Image: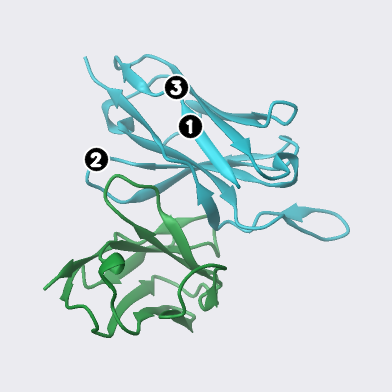
Chain colours: A cyan, B green
């Protein structure tokens, strides 16, 4: 069974840091792009970041660029999100999600599908003093 | 940035009803659209990708259509398990989601 399990959420003061983890199982983790998506309480879904299969390429939403860093350890089947300089508006449930299929690869590059399946259960990050 | 607008924001319906949710993109996204279902306190679940491709294991009462800027998600005969919030998501240019449509029991 494909499974994603997030951990590392909690209460942090504004300006603080937190590292989220997402443990993957049931599939070949190193073959998939991975994503983080967040959802503020009572609000909609917002894409945060993505990383390619080998960790060499990353992208971020403008709202977190320069503050968050996505990474992965394919030997440990684990995805990470390092969050620094946290703000109240970063308060949300953070979901990790797998790219829907293995990447499409041409002769020169590989591309994410950019739709998400499955998702983890989420971990709550609360930024408050 | 591509903006996604869903309508209605809330929809009241009864078991057995046929319902349609609309998603409009601020510019053409070809068929690069997915639909998700989310229940309270749970993670989203993929229903449809590439506008009309039904994900494996998703009941056939769900269907998607559209291309360009206008898309629809249709549930042919509502079941009790279908009352949830539905989100569309474009992936033509990075990623953005609609604001969600809450499907309530009438």
Please identify the quarter of the rendering in which residue B61 is found.
bottom left
Q: Are marks 2 and 1 on the same chain?
A: yes
Q: Residue at x 54, y 54 (%)?
A: A117
**Disc 3 chain ID:** A
Q: Which numbered disc covers residue A6?
A: 1
In the rendered image, residue A75, in percent from the top left (x then y), is placed at: 75, 27
In the rendered image, residue A29, in percent from the top left (x then y), is placed at: 70, 40
Q: Are marks 3 and 1 on the same chain?
A: yes
State whether residue A63 is above or below residue B13: above
Instruction: Determine whether label 2 and label 1 are within 8 Å by CB.
Output: no
Q: Which numbered disc covers residue A41?
A: 2
Q: Earlier in the sequence, mark 3 or mark 2?
A: 3
Q: Which numbered disc covers residue A35?
A: none
State whether residue A25 is above or below residue A85: below
In the rendered image, residue A86, in percent from the top left (x then y), is placed at: 36, 22
User: Which residue is more in the foreground, B100 or A84?
Assistant: B100
Q: Residue at x 53, y 62 (%)?
A: B91
């Amino acid at each position: 069974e494909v499974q994603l399990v997030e951990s590392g959420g909690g209460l942090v003061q504004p300006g603080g840091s937190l590292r989220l983890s997402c443990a993957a199982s049931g599939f070949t983790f190193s073959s998939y792009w991975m994503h983080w998506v967040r959802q503020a309480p009572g609000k909609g879904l917002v894409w945060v970041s993505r990383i390619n299969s080998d960790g060499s390429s990353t992208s971020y939403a403008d709202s977190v660029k320069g503050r968050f860093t996505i990474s992965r350890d394919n030997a440990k089947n684990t995805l990470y999100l390092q969050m620094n300089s946290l703000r109240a508006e970063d308060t949300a449930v953070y979901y990790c999600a797998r790219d829907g299929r293995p990447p499409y690869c041409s002769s020169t590059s590989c591309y994410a599908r950019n739709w998400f399946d499955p998702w983890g259960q989420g971990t709550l990050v609360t930024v408050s003093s | 940035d591509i903006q996604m607008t869903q309508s209605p924001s809330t929809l009241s319906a009864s078991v057995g009803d046929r319902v349609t949710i609309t998603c409009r993109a601020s510019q053409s996204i070809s068929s690069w659209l997915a639909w998700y279902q989310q229940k309270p306190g749970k993670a989203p679940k993929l229903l449809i990708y590439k506008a009309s491709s039904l994900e494996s294991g998703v009941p056939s009462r769900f269907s998607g259509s559209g291309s360009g800027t206008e898309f629809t998600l249709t549930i042919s005969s509502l079941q009790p398990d279908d009352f949830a919030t539905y989100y569309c998501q474009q992936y033509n240019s990075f990623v953005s989601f609609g604001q969600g449509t809450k499907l309530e029991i009438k």
